Amino acid sequence: MQLGYTGAPRGRVNCIDLGYCTKKKIFPDIRHGGYDACRSVHAEQNAIISASRKDMIDGTMYLVGIRKDTNGYEEGANSCQICRKMIINAGIKEIVIRGNNKEEYTKIDIDEWIKNDDLLEGITVY
């Protein structure tokens, strides 16, 4: 099992410690994009780069988004497009995402992301 967290790369300062989000500062009106301005490595990315590909193939990834500012669950949490591409290439089969409370969760079959490429429709996510 590999664990991942969302945060700045090793040795760099996290946005929570800076007191502001660099992505929101540069792109204040964009939620689903502008990730090149984000200081963080996402939890999915950290988990994937910490494991060998053979350990990822046909695996299940579990995601729980906890907001540092409220300590509540991240509403509508999902993987961004960059993470989706990494998850597909890692060979992960399924993602289970914690919902807005402990009893609510969503299962995603990664084959659906492969078959339904929302970027081809111009749709951006999370």
Image (spheres, helix red, strand yellow):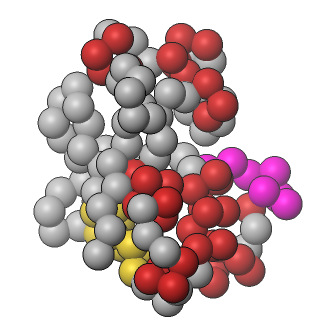
Q: Dividing the picture into quarters, in which one does residue 106 lie?
A: bottom left
Q: Residue furthest bottom?
A: 58
Q: Is residue 18 above or below residue 83?
A: above
Q: Position of residue 69 (x, y in %)?
A: 22, 26
Residue 75 makes an appearance in the image: no
In depth, the one of 14 and 109 nearer the eye is 14
Name, please, the residue furthest toward the right: 120
Instruction: State yes or no: residue 122 in magenta.
Output: yes
Q: Viewer-proximal residue, 33 or 29?
A: 33
Q: Which residues are magenta?
A: 119-125
Q: Does 19 sit above or below residue 77?
A: above
Q: Position of residue 80 (x, y in %)?
A: 57, 50
Q: Residue at x 64, y 52 (%)?
A: 82
Q: Quadrant of the N terminus?
A: bottom left
Residue 76 coordinates in the image, percent (x, y): 40, 51
> Residue at left 32%, top 10%?
19
In depth, the one of 103 and 3 nearer the eye is 3
User: Horizontal and vertical percent for residue 114?
Assistant: 71, 77
| Residue found at x 62% / y 34% | 35
Image position of 91 (left or right of 107): right
Q: Is residue 34 toward the left or the right of residue 11 in the image?
A: right
Residue 27 visible within the image: yes
Residue 71 image-quadrant placement: top left
As displayed, is residue 54 above or below residue 48? Answer: below
Q: Is residue 117 magenta?
A: no
Work out whether residue 65 or residue 52 is closer to the camera in this orientation and state it.
Answer: 52
In the image: residue 87, left or right of residue 73: right
Q: Residue at x 18, y 40 (%)?
A: 72
